[in-house]
Amino acid sequence: MNTKFAFFILKLPMAMSMLGHGLVRLPKLNSFAEGMAEQFKDSMLPDFLVLPFGYLLQLVELVIGILLLTNWQTKNTIYAGLLTMALLIFGSSMIENWGAITAQLVHAIYFAVMFYFLTKNELATHPA
């Protein structure tokens, strides 16, 4: 099997998930961000951090999905995905949303698997 095609097939579900998360929230950009701020109002995280993150998250998810589909800057995109998941897991912990953390961990593990296969392939094609 073609390695590039196999890696694309591995990336496709995550690309669709991230793209879908971003696309579905774009029409309701304000309500999503304000809803997130409302969820975090009693947390240790200040509103001046949560509200901008709520706006930015939708765009970050959309861009990550597009970049995974187009195979541009894939390693950096995976880093961005892992960072996004780490921030989401931290935020969910701050409001004790343990159910959301499960889905976020699954995404993080999937990003880590993609990173493993990407770097394993790079090492195989570019030995030290």
Image (cartoon, rainbow, N blue to C red):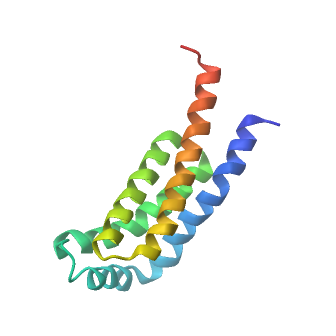
In this rendering, the count of numbered labels is 0
Q: Quadrant of residue 34?
A: bottom left
**In the image, residue 62 above or below residue 28:** above
**In the image, residue 19 above or below residue 68:** below
Residue 82 pos. (x, y %): 44, 51
Taking depth in this image into account, of 113 and 68 the one nearest to the observer is 113
- Give the residue furthest to the top: 128
**In the image, residue 113 above or below residue 125:** below
The residue shown at (52%, 71%) is 21
Residue 113 pos. (x, y %): 58, 46
With 58 as the anchor, is 113 left or right in this view? right
**In the image, residue 109 above or below residue 116:** below
The residue shown at (49%, 63%) is 62
Q: Quadrant of residue 48?
A: bottom left
The residue shown at (20%, 71%) is 45
Placement of the N terminus among the 4 image quadrants = top right
The residue shown at (38%, 65%) is 88
Taking depth in this image into account, of 11 and 111 the one nearest to the observer is 111
